[in-house]
Image (cartoon, helix red, strand yellow):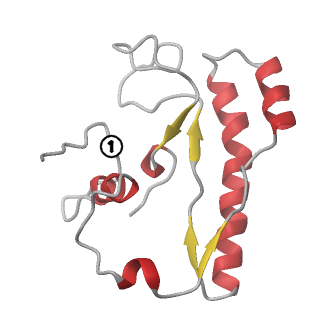
């Protein structure tokens, strides 16, 4: 089996941080020792990072192709992750990031209606990888 992670971010000349994170998220990274997943105090969110009411209000205000929809829906995700990192730090724990949602894709060039130009019918939002919203380095 061969897997190639394209359109990812956060790699450096010294290490492919983005590719590693994508592989971990897909449960394809077999390099971590078993202790990576079992030792420590893991701190995770329980439930979604925004409410249905928050989503409905933003969806009523901005169309699906709008970058403003993405920014307004990403804000509560970032607040939840900020709080998760603070709690994990306070208890000496290891944060486990929640599922993240992108309401606009990320691309090096221009997007059309928040999508890659070559994928005009891609569904939005989509469960996006960490490196689409955060730098994992």
Name which quarter of the figure residue 54 lies in: top right
**Would you say 80 lies left or right of 137 here?**
right
**Would you say 17 lies left or right of 14 here?**
right
- Residue at the image point whose x is 35% and y is 47% from the top: 9
- Residue at the image point whose x is 28% and y is 57% from the top: 28
Q: Nearer the viewer, residue 10 or 98?
A: 98
**Would you say 93 lies left or right of 46 here?**
left
10 Å crowding of disc 1: few (<14), some (14-19), many (20+): some
Q: Nearer the viewer, residue 68 or 20?
A: 20
Q: Nearer the viewer, residue 118 or 99?
A: 99
Is 91 rendered above or below residue 129?
below
- Residue at the image point whose x is 43% and y is 49% from the top: 131
**Whole-percent x and y of residue 92?**
61, 88
Give the quarter of the figure containing the C terminus: bottom left
**Whole-percent x and y of residue 58?**
79, 27
**Would you say 45 lies left or right of 134 here?**
right
**Whole-percent x and y of residue 107?**
39, 30
Name which quarter of the figure residue 25 lies in: bottom left
- The tally of labels here is 1
Q: Which residue is mark 1?
A: 8
Looking at the rendered structure, the secondary structure element under dot 1 is loop
Name which quarter of the figure residue 86 lies in: bottom right
Residue farthest to the left, as pictured = 1
Is 132 rendered above or below residue 70?
below
**Whole-percent x and y of residue 47?**
73, 54
Is 34 rendered above or below residue 57?
below
């Amino acid at each position: 089996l061969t897997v190639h992670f394209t359109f990812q971010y956060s790699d450096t000349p010294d290490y492919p941080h983005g590719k590693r994170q994508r592989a971990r998220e897909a449960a394809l990274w077999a390099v971590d020792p078993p202790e990576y997943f079992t030792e420590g105090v893991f701190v995770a969110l329980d439930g979604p990072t925004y409410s249905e009411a928050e989503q409905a209000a933003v969806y009523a205000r901005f169309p699906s192709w709008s970058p403003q929809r993405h920014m307004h829906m990403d804000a509560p995700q970032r607040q939840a992750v900020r709080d998760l990192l603070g709690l994990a730090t306070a208890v000496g724990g290891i944060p486990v990031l929640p599922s993240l949602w992108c309401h606009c894709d990320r691309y090096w060039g221009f997007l059309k209606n928040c999508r890659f130009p070559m994928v005009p019918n891609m569904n939005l939002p989509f469960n996006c990888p960490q490196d689409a919203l955060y730098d994992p380095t």
